[in-house]
Structure formats: structure tokens, C-alpha cells
């Protein structure tokens, strides 16, 4: 048996008519007299393994009936075409071997509560739905990297330990760093600005952290973010890049992960529609839309999830809202030369109420204006001395943005809560398993 | 001028005879009478821009002489072949514009001390040597991902916040996590084991953290690690994968980043030689080699940098040392069925004294043995209950390893200290800039 080739279910179509070994786990089974039908999963897919009483020794047939859910098994048999199954193939079993038993597996086919599933995240991952989500996440991550590789960007990893805060320390996790305190990064942007001055077009892609006391369906304390930053880019070029990038990522998933989207019952036509140009409206126009929709909001207020949803429902693709009031945004945003009250920034709101997926904009590249902003925000000047250096030594117009991976996974998969978008979610009240 | 196409130096060969705009920074210059030679960098390369007095207005020629190091400039001119330069092309300048001035740029062509360069890491990155290292790092990261994508692995991001310690809390960074304490991950392995049971072949690739009080040339407090984990793999298969993987990564760099290796004056022939099979010796054989080399070491002791260097010098490619004494290694290592004193683990030592780049092995898959180990190591049993679940519900033989990215970058680039292998290094005494 061990002489035979170990084949993964995802590659089974290349082995029709051949004897193979599958190595996996029992996902489910049913029997009917002289036949056992085992659903075998191996992490790449699920296949039906059919045991006909006449084909195997008596003891194998009897043993097969007793294998319990999630026991690990090696299945030896012949690959046969089976047009009725989604996979198109099944296994005609010749022998079967239990590697590790499994008794009273906690996640049965019945419905379980979310708290229970979260507590058993290490086992919950074995379900076909979680496999579909993780494959789409993998596809999104690969598409992100391919996009930047194909467009002349250099990966520059941002540090996780940072000495000072970008936008105040309120939402930062503090770490004891030998004899001093450090904070976990909430954005690699400032470092990417330095890197863009060195390498032109750069991006970082890593975990970021926010200690927000929010228990909403959109908040994780630990989430992955990709942040491109480009020298010699203005806001317009930044928006062009953002829409081109998002179109690419969505269309790669549609092209390569259709089966997984179907498992999740996602309306794929809505994703196929995600083609540039995306609508662009100014903050001022957005305020008008919100007021017309009966929202009570005044110029100068930032948008929350509710406002984002109202605006996103007006469009069938992501909408870019640009030029927010400078007072809503971080100190490093460049002020609009046509209106000092506005910042040259942009947020991209996903359609269907999935919220903000991108925040970015052009950065302040004037030394004096930036220094003024740092003082105005009461930020410690000496902590930003290196950042000011980027305006001392050959400053250039530059822009960038950050895209949150989990929100993007949630949108593309059609998941209402971000907790399923990452393998081991970390929430305000959860750091286990 | 702004109507013209902005071209990056890396793509200049496609524009011979055409008028283009370069957008970059002044790296250096020299003059000789009627000619100024500007070295212009834009993050993708360096090109010589030649200003002939007769070709440009008088004021442009005079202004060009005054542009100082690291001023940002736009250069308008024609792309000409230049066989004498490494790039093969130069620019015949027609006009030039200073975007942002730069005065008294701190990093001049003279030699600077390491402390000064580290303090100015945000500017130091602009040097051609750092660009070469970062391009090789980028190539290594891409090769790592391509390898796992091409071989049926699923990316499963491991969490950074962890509740319990893999191998004690001594070297862990502690974080205040709302009302409790969390630790920053030092390895995603335990999570990858759960993921391998769900998805078969998986890997994680992210930052990891060690709070070691070490100021050696091999230690960072924050470093990137890639960790594959495979269900139904034993130690032998694990070693086969490790050598195939390392060969692939090294050969991709040799193939795609030769020019950068030359800038670093790396002996490329030594890298070309990194082809499998790699030598494999047992710990017991390694002890013999060390004793024959005059080292005072007894069976049961772990190897430090000195021992690794002695062994690595016996071979012209990475050497895999397997089956260390179980007492040297972590509780989750599977014991050798042929000798309970030995663990089925492996370390891969890079040649030329660059130290350990891989640690891994087969994991204990027997519930009772693993529980015994947890007790023996005085680890809190309830914290590992989810980990024990992986042996309760369909346990299978499985193995994996972790490869440290910075040590791999150091080895491939030929760098003596890891501080240059990562954009913003974090050391015991450094978290700035």
C-alpha cells in the first residue's frame, strides 16, 4: 500500500483509472446495504470514497462502518469518473486504514453557536466553508503581491515595534521593551514614506494593531494591512492606482476562486461588476447625499459605518470619497491647495455595506507646513525629526494608501463579521486558541 | 515638460532615442568645463545625466552646477546608448528642474560609523548598497511565496498575540491586552499544526519576536520567519522539502539578482553551488566532528554559533543536523522510535559560518506521550488543551520547519551583521527611527 502514490484530492483529475492513496480525514459517511459512502477530506478538497462489499475483505467492510467523524484515514483505491459529484471523480476503495481515531468530535453537522465555534477555532477550520474562505484569503494575498510585483514596487517590511505614535497613543498596544516602552504599529505609512524616497514605489504588508474598545463586526485588534507608497504621486494618481489595484484583486478572485465563492453562496455577478472607473465624490458631495437621505450630519464630522453604508448603497461598485475636512484627518495629510480646510485624502468604501476598505491620500511634503501641523497636534517634535528629514532632503510630492485585508476578505466572501476572515481572530475579548 | 512620459531608470532600455522625464534625486555629480555629469537615482537604479553647455539655456547650465546631493529633480532629455556604463544608457539633458532642495545631507560619500548610519536608517536606505540588499530581500520573499504556491501550500497567517508560551516566557515580549496579558508570538508552529490538520500543507510568514538579551551580530528582537507545516510528513520528507526549498530560493536569487550580488561583491560561485542533496549528519556524528576538531563538548549539549561554524566549514553547502538529544529540544518534538533519548528534529546550518537558518522536525503525534511531555516540562496543561485536541481527533504524523528570513538574507548577501538585512532593524538597544 505504501508503494502507491499519495495523491491530493485537488489533483485527482490527473489520475483517472489509476490506483492511488489518499491521506486525509473522514468528514462524513452513509451506508446502504452493500455500500459505504465515505466523504474524505484532505485539506485540498472532499471526495466520495465508495466501498462495495464485494470488493474488499469482510473485515475491512465492517471496520469502515465504524470509522467516526474526523478519524484520520489512508484510503487505497482506483480513481473513477463520477459526473454526479461536484468534483467529477470518486474513489473505488480497495483498502482502508485508520491512522488516528477520533471520538466525540465536538463539531457535528448540526448548528453550533458562534461562541462555541470560536472556542474551537482550531477544529472549526476543518469545515468546507472555512476552507473556502481561507482559499479566497490566500488568493487575495497572492493577488495583492502579484499586483505590486507586476507594477515595479519593492516590498519594504515596516517595523512592528515603534517608539512613537502616528496619531496619539489611545488605541495603541504598549509593550515593555527592555528598559523602555514600545508600541505595536498601527500603520507602516511613515516608514513607507522614507522608503519611497529611497526606492520610488514601495509597499509593506504585515500585521497591524489597534487597541480599540470596539466589539463591532468590523473590528479586530490584530489585522493585516497592505500599504503602498509612491514618490512623485499626487492624489489623482493615488486614486487611479487604488481603483486599478482593487479591480485586479477582485477579478483575480472571480477568475481563480469561483468554486469557493459558490460554496459561500456569494452573488458573483456583484463581484464581476467591480470594474474601473469607480465613482469619485468629494466629501462635500457626500454630505449632500447624506442630507438628502435624511441623515443628520454637519460639515466637518467624520463618517461612521452608518454613513458609509448609506453612501455605498448609491453605487454598484466601490466609491472613493476624497477631500475630507482637514480637521477629521491625520496631521500628515497634505492640505488642498485650493482650500486649506480640505485635505488631499481619499477613503474607498466597498459596496453592499461592507464599509471602508482603503484610507489614503497625498502626504504633506512642505517642511514648514508639516512642522506646523505637528505642533498644532501637540505631537512630540523630536520623535518626528527623522520624518521631517524626508522634507529636509529632497522632498517630493508623494501619496499612498492602506488596504485592510480582513475587510476585503469579508467583502469579497460576503461575510457579515470579520471574525471568519482570518485564521485565528483576535478580538477585544478573545485571544484564544 | 509635463506632457512627456515619466520613465523609471529600470525601464530606460525601452526608450532609446526618445525624449523622457526622469523623476528622482541627485546622487552625485562632477563637472569638466562645458559638461556636467549628474548621477541621478530614482529608486530603481542610477543613471548618468549629461548636460552639455551648448544644449541647454545658460541659466540651466549654471543652476545644474549648484544642485546639491539628494535634491529631488526632474530631468528632461533624450535616452542615449552608453556602452561604458553598467546600465548601458545615459541621458542627454535638455532641461532640469529642482523639486525639493537638500542642504548638508548627512550621509556623504565618505565613511560613516555604524551607529551614525543606524541613527539615520531612513536616509541610509537611499544608498546603492542598501537598494541591492532590499532587492535581494524582496527576491527571497517572493521566491519563498512562489515555492509554497507552486507546491500546493495554503497560506495561513498565524496570530501575533498569543496567550501562552511555546517554550517558557523568558524570551517573550509581554503586552497589556485590555484586562489581561498577552505575549508576542515567537513561532506560529502550534497554530500551523492545527492548520495542517485542516488544510494538509500550510505555511505562515510573518514577524516573530524574541526578547533575548543578546547583542550579537545574529540577533534581532523582531524578525520574519516562514514556517511550513505538513500533515502526513515524517522527518525524512521534512528534510527533503527543506533542501528543495532552500535550493530553489538561492537559485532564484542567483538567476534574478546577479547584478545586486555583484554590487555587494558576493562570491556568486559559492551560491551557484547550493544544489541538493545537502549533507545530512546526525547530532551524534556532529559531536564526533566537533571533538575531532578539538572542541570541548559533551553529548547532550546544544550547539552555539561556534560549534555551528566548525561544522559548516566542513561542507560547501548547507548541512542538516538531525536527531538532537530530546533534552535540548522543545516538548513537541517527536521522540525517535529507535532511541527515546533522541528527537526527530533537524537544524539546517548555512555554509561559510552564517549559522542556523532552519529549525524543525517531526511533531509528537501521540496523545499520551505529548501530555507526558507537557507535564514533564511543567507547562500549564489547560493552555495546551486545544493543542492536545489535534491528537484527540484524527492525529497524523506531521512535520514542519521555520526559516529565518534575515539570516537567509544575510547569508545570501554575504553580510556579517543582520542589521542590514531588514529595512528598520530592531535590536535590544534600538527601536528608532
Image (cartoon, coloured by chain):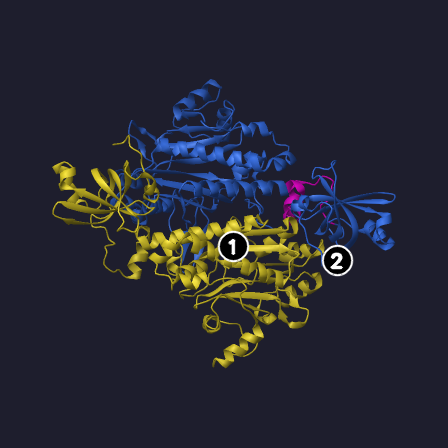
Chain colours: A yellow, B blue
Is residue B66 placed above or below B215 in the rendered structure?
below
In percent of width and height, residue B200 lies at 34, 43
In percent of width and height, residue B155 lies at 42, 47
**Mark 1 or mark 2, which is nearer to you?**
2
Which of the pair B95/B241 is nearer the observer? B95
Mark 1, Cα crowd under 10 Å, few <14 / some 14-19 / many 20+, is many
Residue at 17 percent across and 46 percent down: it is: A36
Is residue B378 placed above or below B273 in the rendered structure?
below
Is residue A217 placed above or below B224 in the rendered structure?
below
The image quarter in which residue B340 lies: top left
For the N terminus of chain A, the image quarter is top left
Q: Secondary structure at mark 2?
A: loop
The chain letter under disc 1 is A
Residue at 25 percent across and 38 percent down: it is: A78
> Which range is magenta?
B105-130
The image quarter in which residue B400 lies: top left
Q: Is residue A60 shown left or right of residue B417?
A: left
Amino acid at each position: 500500500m505504501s508503494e502507491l502514490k499519495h495523491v491530493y484530492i485537488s489533483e485527482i483529475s490527473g489520475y483517472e483509472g489509476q490506483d492511488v492513496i489518499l491521506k486525509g480525514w473522514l468528514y462524513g459517511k452513509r451506508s446502504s446495504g452493500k455500500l459505504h459512502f465515505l466523504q474524505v477530506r484532505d485539506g485540498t478538497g472532499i471526495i466520495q470514497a465508495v466501498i462495495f462489499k464485494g470488493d474488499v475483505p469482510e473485515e475491512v467492510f465492517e471496520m469502515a462502518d465504524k470509522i467516526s467523524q474526523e478519524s484520520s484515514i489512508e484510503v487505497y483505491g482506483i480513481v473513477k469518473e463520477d459526473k454526479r459529484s461536484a468534483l467529477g471523480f470518486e474513489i473505488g476503495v480497495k483498502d482502508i486504514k485508520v491512522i488516528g481515531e477520533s471520538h466525540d468530535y465536538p463539531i457535528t453537522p448540526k448548528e453550533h453557536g458562534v461562541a462555541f465555534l470560536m472556542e474551537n477555532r482550531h477544529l472549526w477550520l476543518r469545515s468546507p466553508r472555512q476552507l473556502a474562505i481561507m482559499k479566497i484569503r490566500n488568493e487575495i494575498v497572492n493577488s495583492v503581491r502579484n499586483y505590486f510585483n507586476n507594477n515595479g514596487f519593492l516590498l519594504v517590511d515596516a517595523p512592528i515595534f515603534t517608539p512613537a505614535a502616528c496619531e496619539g497613543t489611545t488605541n495603541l498596544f504598549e509593550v515593555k521593551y527592555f528598559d523602555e516602552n514600545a508600541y505595536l504599529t498601527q500603520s507602516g505609512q511613515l516608514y513607507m514614506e522614507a522608503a519611497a524616497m529611497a526606492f520610488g514605489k514601495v509597499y509593506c504588508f504585515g500585521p497591524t494593531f489597534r487597541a480599540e474598545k470596539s466589539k463591532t463586526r468590523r473590528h479586530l485588534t490584530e489585522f493585516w494591512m497592505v500599504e503602498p507608497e509612491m514618490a512623485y504621486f499626487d492624489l489623482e494618481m493615488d486614486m487611479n492606482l487604488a481603483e486599478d489595484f482593487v479591480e485586479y484583486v477582485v477579478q483575480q478572485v472571480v477568475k481563480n476562486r469561483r468554486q469557493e465563492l459558490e460554496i459561500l453562496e456569494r452573488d458573483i455577478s456583484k463581484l464581476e461588476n467591480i470594474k474601473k472607473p469607480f465613482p469619485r465624490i468629494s466629501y462635500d458631495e457626500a454630505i449632500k447625499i447624506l442630507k438628502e437621505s435624511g441623515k443628520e450630519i454637519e460639515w466637518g464630522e467624520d463618517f461612521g459605518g452608518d454613513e458609509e453604508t448609506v453612501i455605498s448603497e448609491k453605487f454598484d461598485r466601490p466609491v472613493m470619497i476624497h477631500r475630507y475636512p482637514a480637521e477629521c484627518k491625520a496631521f500628515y495629510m497634505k492640505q488642498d491647495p485650493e482650500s486649506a480646510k480640505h485635505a488631499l485624502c481619499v477613503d474607498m468604501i466597498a459596496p453592499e455595506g461592507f464599509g471602508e476598505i482603503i484610507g489614503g491620500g497625498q502626504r504633506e511634503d512642505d517642511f514648514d507646513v508639516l512642522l506646523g501641523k505637528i505642533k498644532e497636534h501637540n505631537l512630540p517634535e523630536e520623535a518626528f525629526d527623522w520624518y521631517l528629514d524626508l522634507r529636509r532632503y529632497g522632498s517630493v510630492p508623494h501619496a499612498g494608501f492602506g488596504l485592510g485585508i480582513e475587510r476585503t476578505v469579508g467583502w469579497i466572501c460576503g461575510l457579515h463579521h470579520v471574525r471568519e476572515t482570518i485564521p485565528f481572530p483576535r478580538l477585544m475579548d478573545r485571544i484564544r486558541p
